[in-house]
């Protein structure tokens, strides 16, 4: 099936196809000079080995590659090239790369030099271990001093670095096969990238406790090597999912209640939302989240518009309040309460968080000045009597995991996620869905059965906790930390959102917010955007469907290939249905079985990033 890339991705720009490298049982995909999906005998050993250069805002350079040469036969492959990065003030960095793979070993060697001097936050290898089938399993870490530590990959998400001062790490790939990943040329450490919804554990060069950004002196050479060594033989092959290659779906035993669906409204988009209020009524979200930030100049006019929007809907309302904390929380909350009273706007809930907590505090950094959260929440209860008070983070799970809020007196806890913090290629974005169950289980381990909300969470990044800005993306590329992403306009976002909802069903969420109504994070495209004015983005369909299903009973559906197809069953007003999403760019054939769906729908094909709804047999 050939589909116009614009329909899928909101842009005609397509990713460069990967080059498959193979040597015996060892396989890897070469993508823009780095290695992805490194497999041994069909099983993923490492998610990636990449040489990355980051700027002072943690943006990732896209180096220009020259002199690329690839040679391979059945037992060996070799890749050589030169990569060049251009920084501010005409500074340059050149990296000579050599990659050699054999049936049981892979070496990735780099030699970097700058003749001008070069500023960077990080320059060197990042090695990604997968999380599914790896989380909670044993590992052996070799430290820089040569000592060994028997440990395990964290099951719950570690807020800091689980392993430091690393020289090598070994884990079991399948019974009988181990993989040692050895890093040379600097001191490495590992962070749990599930904090940012990345589906990986990341081992990276240069400890975060060291200063950044830092300067690579002119003429200095930085030589590094990452080696992957496979030992042993697989004892048995995994069973095939189906002889015809189809993906099997079977109903499981887990059940629950579909969450409420939210839509966020900012003061900047309030006028556009009022113009599109009939579409807001059509979606009928259970919650409208009104973002309010006095530091951004929001005041009485914003609240008055929020009231008009809220009065025209049957939804509950939450004021998402970024408290400046420049003065005492009691004074600031009292002033905001006066504005609400003057505008006759009484939200059903207030989600309050100090504005400064939207910025990340990485390991080794000094925590910024902030009133105790007990004081912030106490002031909110006093200023807004009778209104439900929620807390948590207006940023991401990372910040909530590192600064755990005192939740006893809160009505709910909340955080957001973003899938393009570290990488923005199509595969990495969809793989973040794998991390969501680990995030929600970690939140539940901290806060128990406290009512729990997620969002606003979208593919574009609305604010950057890790730098001074989000990245402009007027050309519609796939770049990390971008405040606009073309895929938000395509079928890709529709599939991502439905996959997101499926992956967090077990969390028992009170509310899930995946979009705004208008603007770059919205369901409706405006003038000057890639689609015609007034067009619905495909994401509209997912959000409307999920809103209609809110409160219904869901039942799990087990996929034989969850990295490709996800599904769930639901009992709603229109009967029992099976909702299915293809989270890949390839057509997928499904075997649902006549015991699950009506016989005529038992074998179906679903297109790239497609969704389908099938009637259940009983």
Image (cartoon, rainbow, N blue to C red):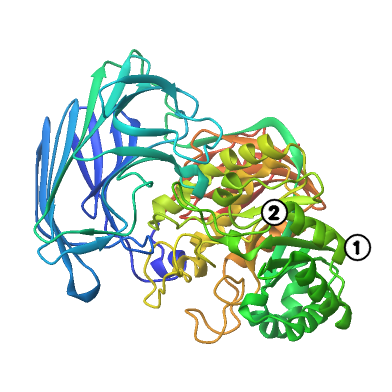
> Which residue is under mark 1?
385
CB-based contact (under 8 Å), mark 2 and mark 1:
no
Q: Nearer the viewer, residue 9 or 142?
A: 142
Residue 587: x, y in percent? 44, 50
Mark closer to the chain start, 2 or 1: 2
Return the mark for residue 372. 2
- Which structural element holds mark 1? loop
Q: Report the side of 31 relative to 219 (left or right).
A: right
- Give the quadrant of residue 229: top left
Residue 82 lies, with reference to residue 74, above or below; the image says below
Q: What residue lies at 77% left-to-right and 46% top-to-bottom?
A: 451
Quarter location, residue 524: bottom right
User: Looking at the figure, which quarter contains the C terminus?
Assistant: top right
At 53% from the left and 83% from the top, the residue drawn is: 532
How far from the left and from the top, in percent, is residue 548?
A: 76, 58
Q: Secondary structure at mark 2?
A: loop
**Residue 443: x percent and y percent?**
65, 41
Task: In this rendered view, identify the residue nearer to me: 143 or 387.
Answer: 143
Specify whether residue 586 is in view. Answer: no
């Amino acid at each position: 099936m050939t589909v116009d890339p614009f329909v899928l991705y909101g842009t005609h720009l397509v990713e460069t196809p990967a080059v498959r490298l193979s040597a015996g049982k060892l396989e890897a995909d070469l993508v823009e000079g780095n290695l992805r999906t490194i497999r041994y005998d069909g099983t993923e050993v490492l998610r990636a080995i990449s040489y990355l250069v980051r700027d002072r805002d943690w943006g990732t350079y896209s180096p220009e590659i020259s002199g690329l040469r690839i040679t391979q036969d059945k037992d060996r492959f070799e890749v050589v090239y030169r990569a060049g990065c251009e920084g501010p003030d005409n500074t340059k960095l050149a990296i000579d790369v050599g990659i050699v793979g054999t049936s049981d070993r892979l070496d990735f060697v780099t030699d970097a030099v700058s003749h001008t001097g070069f500023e960077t936050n990080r320059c060197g290898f990042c090695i990604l271990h997968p999380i599914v089938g790896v989380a909670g399993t044993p590992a052996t870490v070799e430290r820089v001093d040569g000592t060994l530590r028997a440990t395990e990959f964290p099951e719950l998400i570690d807020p800091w670095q689980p392993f430091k001062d690393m020289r090598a790490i070994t884990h079991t790939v399948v019974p009988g096969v181990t993989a040692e990943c050895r890093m040379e040329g600097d001191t490495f450490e590992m962070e749990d990238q599930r904090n940012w919804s990345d589906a990986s554990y990341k081992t990276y060069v240069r400890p975060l406790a060291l200063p950044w950004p830092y300067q690579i002196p002119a003429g200095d050479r930085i030589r590094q090597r990452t080696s992957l060594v496979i030992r042993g033989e697989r004892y048995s092959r995994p069973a095939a999912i189906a002889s015809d290659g189809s993906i099997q779906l079977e109903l499981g035993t887990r059940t629950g209640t579909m969450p409420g669906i939210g839509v966020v409204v900012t003061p900047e988009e309030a006028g556009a939302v009022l113009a599109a209020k009939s579409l807001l009524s059509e979606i009928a979200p259970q919650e409208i989240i009104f973002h309010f930030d006095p530091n951004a100049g929001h005041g009485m006019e914003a609240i008055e518009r929020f009231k008009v929007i809220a009065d025209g809907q049957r939804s509950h309302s939450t004021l998402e309040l970024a408290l400046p904390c420049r003065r005492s929380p009691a004074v600031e909350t009292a002033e905001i309460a006066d504005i609400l009273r003057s505008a006759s706007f009484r939200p059903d809930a207030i989600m309050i968080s100090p504005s400064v907590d939207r910025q990340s505090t990485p390991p080794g950094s000094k925590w910024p000045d902030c009133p105790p959260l007990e004081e912030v929440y106490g002031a909110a209860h006093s200023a807004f009597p009778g209104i439900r008070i929620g807390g948590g983070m207006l940023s991401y799970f990372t910040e909530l995991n590192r600064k755990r809020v005192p939740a006893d007196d809160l009505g709910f806890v909340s955080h957001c996620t973003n899938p393009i913090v570290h990488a923005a290629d199509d595969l990495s974005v969809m793989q973040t869905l794998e991390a969501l169950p680990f995030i929600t289980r970690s939140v539940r381990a901290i806060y128990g059965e406290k009512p729990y909300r997620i969002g606003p969470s979208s593919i574009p990044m609305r604010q950057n906790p890790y730098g001074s800005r989000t990245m402009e993306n007027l050309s519609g590329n796939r770049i990390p930390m971008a405040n606009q992403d073309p895929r938000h306009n395509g079928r890709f976002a529709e599939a991502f959102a439905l996959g997101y909802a499926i992956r967090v069903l077990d969390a028992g969420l009170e509310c899930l917010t995946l979009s705004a109504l208008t603007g770059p994070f919205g369901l409706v495209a405006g003038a000057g955007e890639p689609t015609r004015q007034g067009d619905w983005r495909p994401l509209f369909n997912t959000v409307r469907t999920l809103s209609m299903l809110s409160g219904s009973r869901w039942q799990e559906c087990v996929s034989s290939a969850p990295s490709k197809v996800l599904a769930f069953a639901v009992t709603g007003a229109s009967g029992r249905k099976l909702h299915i999403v293809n989270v890949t760019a390839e057509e997928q054939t499904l075997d649902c079985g006549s015991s699950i769906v009506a016989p005529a729908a038992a074998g179906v094909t679903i297109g790239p990033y497609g969704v389908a709804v099938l009637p259940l047999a009983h």
